[in-house]
């Protein structure tokens, strides 16, 4: 058996085309404010990619740049102004913020209605309560879309989420629980990751630890979703899961790159359009 590769790049392309058509048909221009503080090289690339993808579907972006030594009060004042600005539909605060700034305090300042990343406790709370209407974080939302697109049955399945961050692990666990999976969450202090993996029908790994999930960790026919972004010994981009080794044992796998990553951007754009539509209903 060789696993079916879930082509996130292709699915994300289809979603972006659909968003583009909807924005064109409605003749609207949703607007996203992007805040970038400091000069983290990865953040610079992520922001550029998000702005490019937004422009391609017809979403306007405005970038607010700050230096590493930005005073948190400046960020708060900007967010207050953007919250009040009716022309702005979404606010994205690129993480990480420069050292010493309490990112949750700044994130929580964003109006939940403009929180297109879904990181505000109000939106996280709606997800936890299993209630519709909130914004769901882009990466876990994209993963659920991939699982559904691949036709994977979720109800009653043992799902293991590795990683417990607020942006991936925790919301992913909630989404899977809301889909009637039996969910376990593993993290850096978990004692026996292998046996948890061996019991899992679906594994979503989001740690950034190279080849954390090995072939002998997984059961036959497991569904493997790889969120991690790592570099192997040759500098090649790869994920948390030993992709080549697991190919003939898993039933479905996402590649890195070309799996979860493109879905994250597509879901962010979808969240911006949804915010626009709710604000203009
Ligand atoms: P994070 O650093 O906030 O969290 C990492 C999590 O992994 C923690 O909860 C930690 O407990 C857990 N962990 C670390 N070592 C572990 C181990 N040995 N066993 C089990 N758990 C372990 O990171 P994050 O923001 O959640 O991102 C995780 C990974 O996913 C990173 O590689 C990141 O670059 C990537 N990521 C990718 C996308 C995408 O769109 N493809 C989006 C977000 C994050």
Image (tube, rainbow, N blue to C red):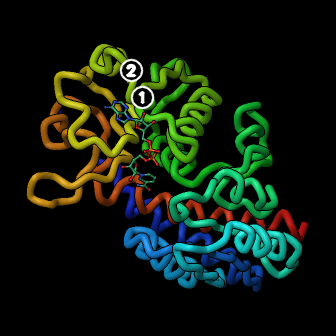
Residue 48: % across, % down: 47, 79
Q: Is residue 239 left or right of residue 112?
A: left
Q: Does the CB distance between marks 2 and 1 fall below 8 Å?
A: yes
Mark 1: secondary structure: loop
Quadrant holding the N terminus: top left
Q: Is mark 2 within 8 Å of ligand 1?
A: yes
Closest to the observer: 72 or 210?
A: 72
Closest to the observer: 232 or 57?
A: 232
Residue, disc 1: 187
Query: Which residue is located at x 52 percent, y 65 percent?
Result: 98
Closest to the observer: 241 or 43?
A: 43
Residue 171: % across, % down: 59, 39
Q: Residues within 10 Å of mark 1 (few under 14, many from 20)?
A: some
Ligand 1 lies in which image quarter?
Answer: top left
Query: Which residue is located at x 63 percent, y 77 percent?
Result: 21
- On screen, residue 90 above or below 26: above
Q: Is mark 1 within 8 Å of ligand 1?
A: yes
Picture quadrant of residue 211: top left
Mark 2: secondary structure: loop
Query: Which residue is located at x 64 percent, y 58 percent?
Result: 117
Residue, disc 2: 190
Query: Which residue is located at x 47 percent, y 63 percent?
Result: 12
Marks 2/1: CA distance? Answer: 5 Å
- On screen, residue 166 above or below 267: above
**Looking at the image, which residue sits at the far left?**
234
Marking on residue 64: none
Q: Is residue 5 left or right of residue 34?
A: left
Q: Is residue 199 left or right of residue 103?
A: left
């Amino acid at each position: 058996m060789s696993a079916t590769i879930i082509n996130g790049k292709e699915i994300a392309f289809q979603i972006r085309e659909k968003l583009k058509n909807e924005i064109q048909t409605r003749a609207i221009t949703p607007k996203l404010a992007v805040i970038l503080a400091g000069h983290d090289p990865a953040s610079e690339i992520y922001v550029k990619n998000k702005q490019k993808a937004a422009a391609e579907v017809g979403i306007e972006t405005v970038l607010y740049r700050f230096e590493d030594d930005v005073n948190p009060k400046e960020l708060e004042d900007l967010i207050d102004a953007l919250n009040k600005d009716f022309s702005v539909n979404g606010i994205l605060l690129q993480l990480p913020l420069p050292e010493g700034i309490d990112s949750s305090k700044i994130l929580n300042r964003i109006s939940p209605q403009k929180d297109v990343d879904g990181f505000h406790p109000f939106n996280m709370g709606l997800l936890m309560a299993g209630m519709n209407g909130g914004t769901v974080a882009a990466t876990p939302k994209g993963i659920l879309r991939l699982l559904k697109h691949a036709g994977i049955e979720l109800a009653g399945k043992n799902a293991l989420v590795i990683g417990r961050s607020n942006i991936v692990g925790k919301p992913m666990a909630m989404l899977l629980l809301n889909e009637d999976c039996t969910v376990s969450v593993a993290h850096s202090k978990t004692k026996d990751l292998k046996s948890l993996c061996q019991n899992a029908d679906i594994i979503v790994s989001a740690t950034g630890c190279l080849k954390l999930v090995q072939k002998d960790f997984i059961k036959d026919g497991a569904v493997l979703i790889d969120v991690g972004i790592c570099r192997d010994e040759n500098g090649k981009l790869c994920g948390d899961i030993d992709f080549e080794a697991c190919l003939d044992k898993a039933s479905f796998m996402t590649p890195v790159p070309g799996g979860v990553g493109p879905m994250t951007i597509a879901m962010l754009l979808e969240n911006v359009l949804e915010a626009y539509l709710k604000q203009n209903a």
